[in-house]
Image (spheres, grey):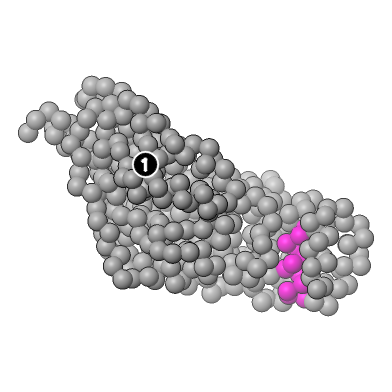
Amino acid sequence: MDDSARIKAFIRAEALALGFDAVGFAAPHLAEEARVGLADFLARGYHGDMGWLAERAQSRSDPKELWPEVKSVVVLGMNYGPESDPLPLLDERARGYVSVYARGRDYHDLIKGRLKTLAQKIAARAPGELKVFVDTAPVMEKPLGQKGGIGWQGKHTNLVSRDWGSWLFLGEIYLSLALPEDAGETDHCGECARCLEVCPTKAFPAPYQLDSRRCISYLTIEHKGHIDAELRPLMGNRIYGCDDCLAVCPWNKFAQATREDSFKTRPGLAAPELAALAGLDDKRFRALFSASPVKRIGRDRFLRNVLIAIGNSGEKGLAQAARDRLADPSPLVRAMAVWALKRLDPPGFAAAKARHLENESDADVRAEWRAAFR
């Protein structure tokens, strides 16, 4: 075994000892298909208002643009699999559905810490420089993951693993040292299209293509403004993210529950009551979601999502929760309170209109009141 092979074996062993579940090694070059796919995604506007995707597209499509010294990429995956199928929670209409990845502590913190520890071990063993990345950097981690052999991009555009199913967080270490690359993974989706068929908003124009503007994960997390009225009824009780396309994948028959305590569901986040969430002020929102990825979208966008779920619940008893938010300080929240109240209590909505519309200064909220009477 030559020295580069020994270093590679050392890195793999140390990564697994630190709790990573999948380790792959890739050359710092992406296939033309990945670069063309990103360009097409951006040209079609599928990125919505995620302008950062377009701003650093060149760095994203070529690892050497991000760091010219890179000669190898270590791609690492950490399993965050749930203990059971999460989708039955979608039927609990008076409760909110939080995506599996966000039910524990923010994965960025744990994975970045482990990557830095691994980087220190590599630096002490091997010559050269290195850099660590979690998904805040412009790295096309899923194509690199496929190139490194830890999974493949499925028809839903997410990474699928034969060993871990759909539930892998990813991170990367760029090395200035050339190491032997692993054999890339091939596509094992076959004729299956479950992930495409299950999407409630039809966010997949074609296999391996995602229109983020219709994706519930994008709408509830990345999108900052009002959500299109046509999409709201399709969102059900999903208040932060969506797991439908991940959870139905047949490869999850090999999935295992995460062994990381930080990724396990925190009390109260498996299926929180919508009525309680609708009453959160900023202080209580921050306390409830401390160290959670949910915290980053802020209270107002979160309550926008909660009120859409309330409007979709069919639970007349939740009308009061919507009514209480008609005077909320946030126009974004007020507008969705109008929409939810109209769906749950039309007579009460008509009575509330006289009290609130004449005093409403925000154009979007006024438009929401008027739209409800069309």
Report the side of 127 relative to 225 (left or right): left
Judge whether 205 appears above or below 290 on screen: below
Residue 29 or 327: which is nearer the viewer? 29
Q: Residue at x 33, y 71 (%)?
A: 192
Image x and y of residue 152, in percent = 31, 55
Q: Quadrant of the N terminus?
A: top left
Q: Which residues are magenta?
A: 334-345
Q: Residue at x 30, y 36 (%)?
A: 28
Residue 325, quarter of picture = bottom right
Q: Quadrant of the C terminus?
A: bottom right
From the image, give the main secondary structure of the stretch colored magenta.
Answer: helix
Q: Is residue 237 visible?
A: no
Q: Which residue is mark 1?
A: 171
Judge whether 55 appears above or below 256 on screen: above
Q: How many numbered discs sit on the rendered protein? A: 1
As drawn, the residue found furthest toward the left would be 1
Query: Can residue 341 be found in the magenta stretch?
Result: yes
Residue 224 or 303: which is nearer the viewer? 224
Image x and y of residue 170, in percent = 37, 46
Q: Is residue 353 visible?
A: yes
Report the side of 369 relative to 84 (left or right): right
Residue 364 or 123: which is nearer the viewer? 364
Query: Can residue 347 be found in the magenta stretch?
Result: no
Q: Residue at x 40, y 40 (%)?
A: 61
Helix, strand or loop at disc 1? strand
Judge whether 349 appears above or below 143 on screen: below
Tell me the kind of residue under disc 1.
Answer: Gly
Image x and y of residue 320, in percent = 76, 69
Report the side of 73 relative to 348 (left or right): left
Q: Residues within 10 Å of mark 1 (few under 14, many from 20)?
A: many
Report the side of 223 relative to 27 (left or right): right
Image x and y of residue 311, in percent = 68, 70
